[in-house]
Image (cartoon, rainbow, N blue to C red):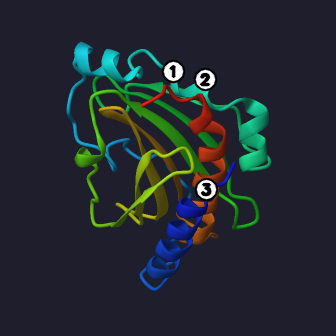
Amino acid sequence: MRTAALTTVIAAAALAAAACTSKQPGQPSPSSGQSAGSGASSSPSSGAANGLAGLNACSLLTDDEAKQVVPGVNPPIDQGELGGTGTNNCQWNKSVTNGAGGVAFSITVRPAQGLEDVNPNGGQTTKTTSNAGRQVVLLTNSGSGISCIAAVAVGSGRVDIEARTLRGATTEEMCTIVEKTDGFVEPKLPAS
């Protein structure tokens, strides 16, 4: 399910960021998980209140759904609390083939970190609303490489959907991966 508002903002942000991107040689690598979040630790009351505490990020996207997002993607890697204490991160990778196509995309559940905690890390942020009525902060080209992150509000917490590459793709392509992933993930999130 695509959202008109999110699609419009992703397209506008990708076009604005395109002038600032450059292609860099190398393999895509996992982000630190901190690029869109602070190091805030989870408190049981806030995570329980928004329904995100204990939610495994890998459960939000099936293998078949991941292959619809990025054909040829490898099985998920459960990275646990890579995004900080109390978070849960899951990552999918597709290797570079013939100099192109390498991408890493991930989902990070952040029960104790809200949209106000998004750290732009040098990237461009845009606020929008999803089709399901959730507030979203879209962050492009944060940190190194070409990237797109949608931080989706879930009560007082959030779920980050990120796509990143170092070669052979554009910010707009990374935002398309984020948008496709959001279409599968958002209906599975707890009500805000």
Sort mark 2 into few (<14), some (14-19) or many (20+) by Cα contacts within 10 Å: few
Q: Which residue: 47% across, 19% down?
A: 55
Q: Are marks 2 and 3 in contact (CB under 8 Å)?
A: no
Q: Which residue: 27% across, 59% down?
A: 121
**Tag of residue 59:** 2
Query: Quick one: 5 or 99, which is closer to the camera?
Result: 5
- SS label for mark 3: loop
**Tag of residue 148:** none
- SS label for mark 2: helix
Q: Is residue 164 above or below residue 55?
A: below
Q: Please state, as top left, top right, bottom left or bottom right, where the C terminus lies in the image.
A: top left
Residue furthest front as drawn: 133
Q: Which residue: 70% across, 61% down?
A: 101
Please, what is the three-letter code of the amino acid marked with disc 2?
Ser
4 horizontally vs 40: left or right: right
Residue 148, percent from left and from top: 48, 59
Please, what is the three-letter code of the amino acid marked with disc 3?
Thr
The residues bearing labels 2 and 1 have C-alpha atoms spaced at a distance of 6 Å
Closer to the camera: disc 2 or disc 3? 3
Q: Are marks 2 and 1 in contact (CB under 8 Å)?
A: yes
- Residue 176, quarter of the rendered image: bottom right
Query: Quick one: 58 or 152, which is closer to the camera?
Result: 152
Say which residue label 3 marks.
3
The residues bearing labels 3 and 1 have C-alpha atoms spaced at a distance of 24 Å
- Residue 169, quarter of the rendered image: bottom right
